[in-house]
Amino acid sequence: MAAPLQYCTFFVDGQCCGLDVARVQEIICAQPMTPVPLAPDVVCGLINLRGQIVTAIDLRRRLGMKERPAEQPPINVVVQTDDGACSLLVDEIGDVLEAPENAFERPPETLADPAKVMIRGAYKLKDCLLLILDADEVVRLDIAEG
């Protein structure tokens, strides 16, 4: 029997999402951001993370969801990628959940872009559907605009 997989969970516009816990570096509250001229719309800016410059990507925009209300500050989920750290802006942090590998379901082929390349699959949980995101695809800016 395979060991259960662990996921860091968070919410984006009410949708429960998760990333492999091994890819998550840390979670931090809203940070001051420096805008980046001519950056793709999904890039909200750059943050200074203890001297390291990190790109902040709005996961709502990335997944094609409605904008976050102005009075709701985002939370930074800092993930490690092959190109270094990147921050994903989410609405709310969930728990670290364990899920058995055999309960994982692939997304349907009919799933539309841009979500199609970013969602690896899902787990049916008691209270919600947990969408598992591919960290590398979520931070790829060359496909960020569709």
Image (spheres, rainbow, N blue to C red):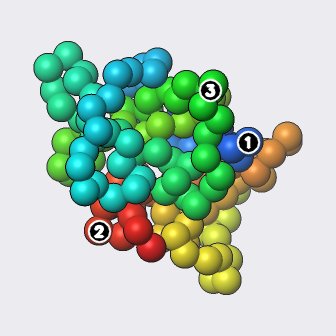
- Residue 18 is situated, as x and y percent measured from the top left of the image, at 57, 44
Identify which amino acid the numbered label 1 is placed on.
Gly
Residue topped by disc 3: 72
Identify which amino acid the numbered label 3 is placed on.
Gln
The Cα atoms of the two marked residues, 1 and 3, are separated by 13 Å
Quick one: label 1, few (<14), some, or many (20+) residues within 10 Å?
A: few
Q: Nearer the viewer, mark 2 or mark 3?
A: 3
Residue furthest to the right in view is 126
Q: Secondary structure at mark 1?
A: loop
Sequence order check, earlier mark of 2 and 3: 3
User: Do we see residue 144 in this rendering?
Assistant: yes
Which residue occupies 76% across, 51% down?
129
Instruction: Name the mark on residue 142.
Output: 2
Q: Is residue 23 left or right of residue 66?
A: left
The Cα atoms of the two marked residues, 1 and 2, are separated by 27 Å
Give the number of callouts: 3
Judging depth in this view, the residue of 99 and 31 nearest the camera is 31
Sequence order check, earlier mark of 1 and 3: 1
Tags 1 and 3 touching, CB below 8 Å: no
The Cα atoms of the two marked residues, 2 and 3, are separated by 28 Å
Residue topped by disc 1: 14
Quick one: label 3, few (<14), some, or many (20+) residues within 10 Å?
A: few
Identify which amino acid the numbered label 2 is placed on.
Asp
Which residue occupies 62% across, 69% down?
106
